[in-house]
Image: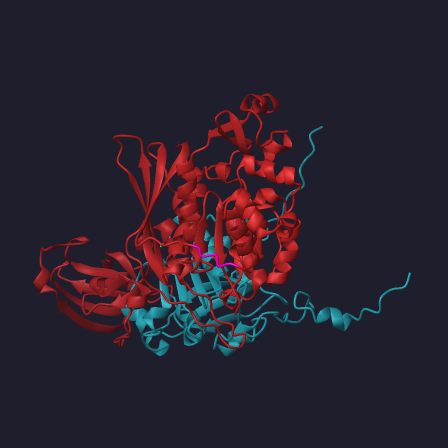
Chain colours: A cyan, B red
Amino acid sequence: MSALPLLLDDVLLRPDIWRGDRLAGLDAESVSSSFAQLDAELPGAGWPRGALVELLADARGMGEVSMLLPALQQCTADALPVAIVAPPGMAHAPAWAAHFPLKQVLVVEAPRDDIAWSVELLLASGALGAVLAWLPAKIGNKSLRRLQLAAEGSRSLAFMFRPLSCMQTASPAPLRLSLRGHQQGLQVDIFKRRGPPCEKTLLLQVARPLPWSRVRSDQPPMRRPQLEVVESKPRQRVV
Amino acid sequence: MSTLWLALRFYRFPLEAFDAAEPPAVAAAQHLVVCANAQAEALGVEAGMRLSGALGLAPGLNVHERQPLREAEALDRLACWAGNFSPHVSLAAPDELLLEIGGCLRLFGGLKVLCGLIRDGAVAQGFSTYMALAPTPRAAQWLARAGREVCCKDAQAGRKNLQDLPVNVIGLSYAEEQTLASLGARRLKDLFALPASGLARRFGIGLPQQLAQALGEAPDLRREFVFPACFVQKLELPAKVEQAAMLLFAARRLLASLSGWLSARAAGVAECDLVLLHEDGIADTHLVLAFASPTRELERMERVLRERLDRLALSAAVTDLRLEAATPVHLPGSTLGLFAQSSAQSLDPVIERLRARLGKQAVHAMQIKEDHRPECATLAVERADVQAVQAGLPRPFWLLPKPQALQERGGALHYGGVLQRVAGPERIESGWWDQGESCAEGVALGNVQRDYYVAVSRRGEWLWIFRDTQGWWLQGVFA
């Protein structure tokens, strides 16, 4: 059998194949998050375009949107609008106006059953710079896969907010982060990425109405929560 | 620029003018089959057959009595649709359209592209067509009648292609065709060989003149189709329709007609009204198709239509459809770039599809209203109407639908642990003018006297809270 002279290095150039100890390259471009410590841990050194980014958070107001502001501002600077789908509160125009031209912000108040459909439509349109969506807790894997496919066909940034409880379930999103509030910054754990597992817990000094130093912190930095490993017991055979 | 005529012959028109697509079917007049669709033909049914014979071959046959009036209306609609491709359209009743496309080839990017568009458009509306191109309308018409799909760019090629056509393409009476047959003239070339004076004596001046027109030797003036001044088109459904999705096929024909009518007038519509008429005594259903910006693109209109029909539950059976476009606005075509430029797609088609499903209010842009009260500071507006503004103090991205009361224990505020106030107070005192007045949302907010603070919870949540005479409240989150 004559084997093709296929070099390992050639194989490794493919964006969907990477060595276990390195971060994968991206076939699409990325947008810098403008946090150096976060960029260092993200494949492609920034938020990937054309891929779902899952942000898992339970509380509101920890800076989960502020963390994305630099990337979103880059979109609106390129005259690409940003869509907010099913926001967790009433969008307050004066706050958004401080960061974006309001013309570039589109609010879509979809009922729970139509959120996935709306996001898919927005991603597939290719007319948006970024889509921020608050997905319902019980979204099926099939819907997520459809969203990932829609994202792959576009150049949009796709940030999907989901509750922390979704950490245990698998998802087709190539990048998944969990966000927790802390009195010294926003605590970010990357628990799925194309590359080696991320051991570090990042504490991002996201933009707040006041400097972080104004908050008196009485807590130690939180420890990274360990993923529970649920072992399936071998089923006993009934004789 | 030479003139080039495109003849479109809808060869199953008596049947396809019925706005339904159920197989197999025939159109019949006086117990004779006039026209059969492909499924019926596969069973052996042919035009000219007796209806009883056809029913014997295909017992499940749907028989439509031929309706010349409906055919005339359908041809008018198709003429409107043809406005998409050329401003010069003329009708050749009962089942042909003539388009002068010599001047439009450049606009559409060549003959092939244009013919493809026309054929796709006809197929999408459910019409079977023969298309032929020739320098004279008469020649194009005859070629299409014979089912020869050829393109003759000059008179010479036209003559060559006409030679072999049978004489029945001229549309003479049965007796005249018999006379011609007895003369031994079966093809057009036989007629071209005969002297014109002799033909004129036997058949009248019409026949030699038509032959000369086909060859481009005599003028052939066609009456141009006049696009109606306002667009209101009615379409009678062949049968009562109970399910909304079944209306799509017929409504699409109306929309295709509207889009052509709009292009002929260089106009667009921001909304049009599809009226579903029910049987006597039941009020009409109005289905307003709204677009995010004026448009005449058929694809956009169809998507919105589909979205609306998907969600529609019919209260009663529909007998007729009517499409009205009351307010067309001027919409010039766009200029193409000299070089291939990739431009970002427009957001408007997405917005109108979202709106068709979620409702108009659900999709909007924001605008700051000059009001200090946070609840009143945001206005939902159209994207096009947003004006640039200066932002002021830091404000939270989200407001709670209603302020939420905060617990106070031992002099400290609690929200998942003790709250720490990091900024404030900021006094907002405003709104005495609309105390107790009613407004769109019910009762106006009225006068507020609040001291706002920024607070941070033990879980790292940055909150916007205020104190008024009734206590402490949480109103916003700095997401």
- Percent coordinates x, y for residue B218 in the rendering: 51, 58
- Percent coordinates x, y for residue A68 in the rendering: 43, 70
- Percent coordinates x, y for residue B405 in the rendering: 23, 56
Q: Is residue B181 left or right of residue B397?
A: right
Residue A136 colored magenta? no
| Front one among B142 and A177 | B142
Residue A58 visible, this orientation: no
| Front one among B270 and B432 | B270
| Front one among B63 and A91 | B63
Q: Is residue A131 left or right of residue B211?
A: left
Q: Furthest-right residue in view?
A: A1
Q: Is residue A69 left or right of residue A195?
A: left
Question: What residue lies at 8% left-to-right and 63% top-to-bottom?
Answer: B433
| Front one among A227 and B81 | B81
Quadrant where the C terminus of chain B is found in the figure:
bottom left
The stretch in magenta equals B218-222
Q: Is residue B433 left or right of residue B214?
A: left
Please, what is the dominant secondary structure of the magenta stretch?
loop
A93 lies above or below B147:
below
B418 lies above or below B62:
below
Residue A35 visible, this orientation: yes
Q: Quadrant of residue A41?
A: bottom right
B119 lies above or below A101:
above
Question: What residue lies at 70% left-to-right and 33% top-to-bottom?
Answer: A237
- Figure disc tally: 0
- Percent coordinates x, y for residue A219 in the rendering: 40, 69
